[in-house]
Image (cartoon, grey):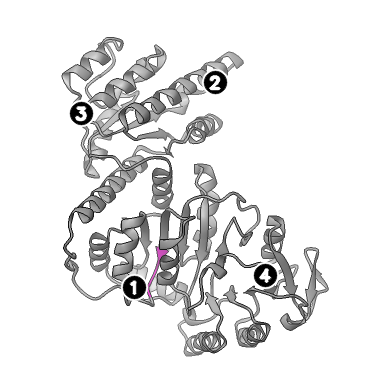
């Protein structure tokens, strides 16, 4: 088995089949990164995006470590044979038209690619995928991907979702160590990448989107071991009959039942999510907060009506919104008037904001023994500015709020989660979110997103604690065979 670090840290890349009309963005993106030697192979062009084009891979005068293949499916075996002659270590096959077509010809062609790789000693990512994004090495699959690395790894069977998640993560101050889109997985599969990220010192949070597993031997133990080291959150596609049918046509994957997958997650500690947005919410949560030590949540908002709904949302996801202790209520009532407000939890906190008592309000809530985490909801409409003076006031209030949140984390060791609701005043919304993101707090666009994240972080923490205290090997608690 080749060291998979060569997948993420090549020194040179060749894009075979790039042209002015076809995947030139691979060339442009990696040239833009400026960390790799980039070669183009296409006999029909003298250059692509300013990079000299060679007639064949063997004509490239220097060593090539990593190859992106973007030629028609029928031509891919001949390109792979050239890769073997050139001594290439990793081949990423962007081209589609293999097992995902559902045809015998497509499956046979894909098997041929895998056979060439086995005989030649290189590894394949794909086919039918976007490949690798690694900020440190300069590997990219679209333009303008961030050059600064972060602690999150994303293993995605979908290329489009890998592109979208990286782009949307920029709005959340989430950055990646590595992202890999692996498509049909004729060679390297989810298991291979998970094994690598388990030990990768640059990765502390692992996210995944999976439609099917081709390699299942040892996967349960690998998931258990990895989850004890790092949080692993996976969105499993194809758990319904309709989803399984769509997966078969997308990546040629067979899919297992929702019941079996649910059992696998409960046994191994995998954090199961339903939507791609949940992956980013969890990434932000784990990057900027620690798992809470209990299920009690204090919610600070500025609407009595919202308080009722939010208590229901917390209960739905297994969190408690405990009534504040008498001492906590006494402290809050000393500066929050009775009329038009509540100090029981959820806390109607607008008067605390308006009176400059944010620090006192948060300190009182965090001191409560039944509270283990705090959610602060901010409405952009209440902070929208109509004058320069109003802008100064907003910024001043934000600084006070940030300092108050830092005090909670430092003095009480309890995580704080910020909700900045979506708003018509989009510039104000983004400005407020950025204030807290830059200060190192997880920010969410809805209270439901924050609550789901807190709940899953709390349950993950409980799972780890229970496993560390339990020296007996866990028993299988799921029914049926492992999902394909």
Mark closer to the chain start, 2 or 3: 3
Image disc number at residue 385: 2
Judge whether residue 211 is colored magenta.
Answer: yes
Mark closer to the chain start, 2 or 1: 1
- How many residues crowd mark 1 within 10 Å: few (<14), some (14–19), many (20+)? many
Question: Could you tell me if residue 151 is visible in this image?
Answer: yes
Q: Which residue corresponds to mark 4? A: 13
Horizontal and vertical percent position of residue 149 = 56, 51
In which quadrant of the rendered view does residue 337 lie?
top left
| 53 in relation to 376, above or below | below
Image disc number at residue 369: 3
**Element on which disc 4 rests:** strand
Horizontal and vertical percent position of residue 108 = 50, 90
Horizontal and vertical percent position of residue 152 = 47, 53
Judge whether residue 74 is colored magenta.
Answer: no
Q: Which residue corresponds to mark 1? A: 255
- Nearer the observer, 235 or 442: 442
Label 2 to label 4, Cα distance in Å? 50 Å
């Amino acid at each position: 088995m080749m060291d998979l670090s060569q997948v993420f840290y090549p020194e040179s890349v060749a894009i075979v089949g790039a042209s002015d009309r076809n995947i030139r963005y691979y060339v442009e993106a990696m040239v833009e990164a400026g960390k790799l030697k980039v070669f183009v192979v296409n006999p029909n062009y003298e250059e692509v995006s300013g990079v000299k084009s060679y007639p064949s891979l063997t004509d490239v005068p220097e060593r090539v470590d990593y190859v992106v293949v973007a030629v028609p499916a029928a031509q891919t075996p001949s390109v792979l044979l050239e890769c073997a002659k050139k001594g290439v270590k990793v081949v990423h096959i962007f081209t589609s038209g293999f097992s995902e077509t559902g045809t015998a010809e497509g499956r046979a062609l894909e098997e041929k690619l895998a056979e060439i790789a086995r005989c030649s000693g290189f590894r394949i990512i794909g086919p039918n995928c976007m490949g690798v994004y690694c900020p440190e090495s300069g590997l990219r699959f679209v333009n303008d991907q961030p050059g600064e690395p972060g602690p999150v790894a994303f293993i995605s069977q979908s290329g489009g979702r890998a592109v979208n998640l990286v782009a949307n993560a920029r709005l959340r101050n989430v950055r990646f160590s590595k992202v890999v889109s692996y498509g049909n997985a004729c060679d390297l599969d989810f298991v291979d990448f998970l094994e690598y990220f388990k030990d990768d010192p640059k990765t502390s949070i692992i996210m995944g989107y999976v439609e099917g597993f081709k390699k299942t031997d040892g996967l349960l133990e690998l998931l258990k071991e990895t989850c004890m080291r790092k949080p692993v959150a996976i969105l499993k596609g194809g758990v319904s009959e309709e989803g399984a049918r769509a997966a078969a046509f997308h990546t040629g994957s067979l899919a297992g039942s929702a019941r079996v997958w649910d059992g696998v997650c409960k046994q191994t500690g995998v954090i199961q999510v339903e939507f791609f947005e949940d992956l980013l919410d969890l990434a932000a949560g784990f990057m900027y907060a620690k798992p809470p030590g209990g299920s009690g949540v204090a919610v600070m908002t500025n609407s009595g009506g919202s308080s009722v709904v939010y208590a229901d949302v917390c209960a739905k996801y297994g969190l408690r919104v405990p009534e504040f202790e008498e001492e906590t209520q006494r402290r809050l009532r000393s500066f929050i008037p009775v009329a038009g407000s509540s100090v029981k939890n959820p806390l109607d906190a607008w008067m605390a904001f308006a009176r400059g008592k944010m620090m006192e309000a948060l300190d009182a809530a965090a001191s409560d023994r039944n509270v283990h985490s705090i959610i602060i909801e901010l409405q952009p409409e209440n902070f929208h500015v109509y004058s320069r003076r109003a802008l100064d006031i907003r910024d001043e209030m934000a600084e006070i709020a940030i300092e108050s949140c830092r005090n909670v984390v430092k003095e009480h060791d309890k995580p704080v989660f910020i909700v900045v609701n979506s708003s018509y005043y989009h510039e104000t919304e983004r400005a407020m979110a950025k204030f807290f993101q830059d200060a190192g707090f997880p920010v969410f666009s809805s209270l439901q997103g924050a609550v789901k994240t807190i709940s899953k972080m709390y349950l993950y923490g409980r799972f780890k604690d229970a496993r560390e205290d339990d020296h007996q090997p866990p028993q299988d608690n799921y029914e049926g065979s492992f999902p394909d």
